[in-house]
């Protein structure tokens, strides 16, 4: 254990994991409450297409993936407005496009498929200084946005029509949430992988909804649960030589199952 903690690669992994353990669940709670849980899967698949293009043209893959995710977030909002009654269509359409584009880029650049696997399933032990700086910047942006706009986001999340009537620029805040989600997903891909990143967005939120009695408690609970899963998941993966991303997600599921099992006791305070 001490040997692992003293390793530079593990320390970088721990720093990156702790930062994402704050931002991903924090954004995730707003997505879950707005019934947009699947947007994480959609943007992560589009990000992988950007990562593949980055490898193909020799540009920092996470940066290209980020640009793709942001573009996809704008496209989702546009389609949500076009299909107001069937808003989930926007998510399905963009996800299909992201998977299709990624498959084509994989075919064009077969030589980098091994590297891309790290982005599909996570490669937290390979985080470099540039990755950590990127994750840190995303964390600061998300925390500042949440701290300064929490009241507006609360109103938008629970009653979008009332928010619009009160004069809140609903479209701006919808786009802001989508862009913040794209930032977090792009920064998370090397930690848990594109195929698992939605779990870090949604499962802590599912856990917090069981134990929290107010929105403020939900915010605190979702971050604490995310951090516990990331830190202990990394430690377990390091000691037993397991896949870090998969270990973190399975630990989150285990926490959720325990909370569901003891839900009556938690609710009554007994």
Image (tube, rainbow, N blue to C red):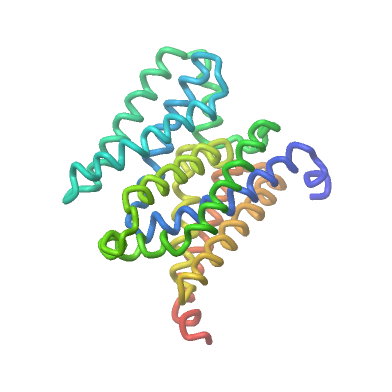
- Relative side of 215 to 5, left or right: left
- Relative side of 260 to 147, left or right: left
Q: Position of residue 73 (x, y in %)?
A: 37, 39
- Relative side of 229 to 266, left or right: right
Q: Position of residue 11 (x, y in %)?
A: 75, 43
Q: Residue at x 54, y 45 (%)?
A: 246
Q: Residue at x 31, y 60 (%)?
A: 167
- Relative side of 174 to 1, left or right: left
Residue 259 vertical position relative to residue 236 in the rendered view, above or below: below
Q: Residue at x 52, y 50 (%)?
A: 24
Q: Give the camera-side residue of 100 and 35.
A: 35
Q: Give the camera-side residue of 48 and 245.
A: 48
Which quarter of the picture shows residue 232?
bottom right
Q: Position of residue 235 (x, y in %)?
A: 69, 50
In the picture as drawn, the residue positioned furthest to the front comes out as 167
Number of numbered discs present?
0
Q: Position of residue 4 (x, y in %)?
A: 78, 44
Q: Residue at x 46, y 70 (%)?
A: 215
């Amino acid at each position: 254990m001490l040997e692992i903690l003293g390793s530079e690669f593990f320390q970088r992994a721990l720093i990156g994991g702790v930062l994402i353990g704050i931002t991903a669940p924090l954004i995730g709670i707003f997505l879950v409450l707005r019934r947009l849980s699947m947007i994480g899967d959609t943007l992560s698949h589009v990000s992988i297409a950007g990562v593949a293009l980055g490898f193909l043209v020799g540009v920092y893959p996470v940066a290209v993936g980020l640009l793709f995710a942001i573009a996809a977030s704008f496209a989702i909002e546009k389609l949500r407005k076009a299909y107001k009654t069937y808003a989930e269509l926007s998510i399905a359409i963009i996800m299909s496009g992201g998977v299709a584009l990624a498959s084509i880029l994989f075919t064009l650049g077969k030589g980098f498929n091994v590297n891309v696997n790290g982005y599909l399933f996570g490669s937290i032990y390979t985080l470099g200084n540039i990755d950590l700086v990127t994750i840190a910047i995303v964390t600061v942006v998300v925390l500042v946005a949440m701290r300064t706009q929490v009241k507006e986001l609360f109103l938008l999340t629970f009653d979008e029509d009332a928010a619009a009537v009160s004069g809140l620029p609903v479209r701006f805040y919808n786009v802001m949430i989508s862009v913040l989600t794209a930032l977090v997903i792009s920064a998370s891909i090397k930690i848990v992988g594109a195929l698992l990143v939605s779990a870090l967005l949604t499962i802590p939120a599912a856990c917090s909804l069981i134990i929290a009695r107010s929105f403020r408690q939900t915010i605190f609970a979702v971050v604490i649960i995310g951090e516990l899963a990331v830190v202990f998941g990394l430690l377990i993966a390091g000691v037993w030589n397991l896949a870090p991303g998969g270990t973190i997600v399975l630990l989150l599921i285990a926490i959720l199952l325990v909370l569901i099992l003891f839900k009556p006791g938690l609710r009554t305070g007994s």
